[in-house]
Image: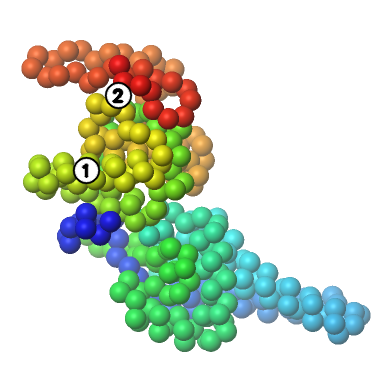
Amino acid sequence: MSDLVTGDAVVLGLRPARLPSRALAIFLDLLVYLTGYLIISIGLTLATASLDPAAQAAVSVASFLLVLVGVPIAVETLSHGRSLGKLACGLRVVRDDGGPIRFRHALVRGAMGVVELLGTFGAIACIASLISARGRRLGDVFAGALVVRERVPGARVMPVPPPPPWLAGRFSGLDLSAVPDGLWLAIRQYLTRMNQLDPQVGAAMAVRLADDLVARTGAPAPAGVPAAAFLMAVVHERQSRDAARAFGPGVAPAYAPQAAAPALAPAPVPGVMPAPAVPTRPATGFAPPA
C-alpha cells in the first residue's frame, strides 16, 4: 500500500518518541516496579521463612514474574498505552495506525522487554531504537506498536471526514478483523488529504483503496455508493468500535443517528441529486441496491 500514500500524507499529527524520552520513561517505570518488587520480596521472605529453599526459590521467581512482567502488561492494557513513566514524559503506546493497543500488544512488548530491558540492561533496546527510523525497539516491532509523543506544541490532528448521514450505521455487521493496520493507515491518509489531491487522481486512489478493503472484508461494497463515502463510513465504524472497546459500549460516534428517531427522507433540493434510498437489513453484509 505504499504506492497509494503520498510523501506528505501525515494524518495522525503525532511524533514518534526518541531514545532519551523513552529511556527516561523506562527508568521511572523500573524505579517504581523495582521498589514494589523489593517491598514484596521482603514480605515474602519473612512469610516463607519456614519453607524449604526450593519453595522459597519458587515464590521468588513467581513474585519476579508477577511484579516485573505481569504488572507492566496489565498497566499498559488497562491504561491503553500509558504507564507512570510514559505519563510523566508525555508518551503513549499506540498501534501502527494510531489506535489504542490491546492486551496482545502489551503482552508481546512485555515479553520482549524481559530480554531487551532486564536481560541485557537495555542494550538491545537502545541499539534497536537508534537503528529504527521511528525509534522502535524489538518489542514494538513484533507487537506492531509505536511509542509517540502526546504533548507536542502546535500539533494538530486532522480528523477523518464524517460519512454521509444515509450511510451511518450501514456497516455495523461488517467483519473488519482481517484488515491490516497498513491499509487502515493508507485509508486515513487518503481521507484527510483527498481535498488536496487532483480529482481524477483522488478518485482513482479511492477506488483502489475500496477494492483492497472489500477484498479483506469479503463483502461487496453497496452499489451506487461512491468509493470515498464507502471508505469514510467503514473508517468511522472502526473508530466507533475502538471507542466502545476503550471507553465502554455507551460511547457512540457523533454522526450516529438517535436510536429512537425515525429515519426521515431529506427534503429535495433543486439541482442536487438526492442520495439513493437503500433498504436496510439486520443481518451482516450489504443490502441489495434499490
Label 1 belongs to which residue? 206
Residue 250, relative to residue 26: is it above or below? Answer: above
Residue 66, relative to residue 202: is it above or below? Answer: below
267 to the left or right of 58:
left
Residue 33, relative to residue 123: is it above or below? Answer: above
Q: Quadrant of residue 223?
A: top left
Q: Quadrant of residue 288?
A: top left
Instruction: Report the residue at 55% width, 57% height from top.
Output: 103
Q: Earlier in the sequence, mark 2 or mark 1?
A: 2
Name the foreground residue: 257 vs 285: 285
**Residue 166: which disc?**
2
Name the foreground residue: 99 vs 74: 99
Instruction: Report the residue at 22% width, 54% height from top.
Output: 4
Q: How packed is label 2: few (under 14 Cα within 10 Å), some, or many (20 or more)? A: some
Can residue 268 be seen in the rendering of this structure?
yes
Place of residue 275 in the rendered image (x, y in percent of width and height, measured from the top left): 22, 21
Q: How is the protein colored in the picture?
A: rainbow
Residue 109, relative to residue 207: is it above or below? Answer: below
Element marked by disc 1 = helix
Element marked by disc 2 = helix
Q: Quadrant of the C terminus?
A: top left
Place of residue 56 in the rendered image (x, y in percent of width and height, measured from the top left): 82, 80
Of labels 2 and 1, the one closer to you: 1
Instruction: Report the residue at 28% width, 56% height from top.
Output: 1
Q: CA distance from mark 2 to mark 1?
A: 19 Å
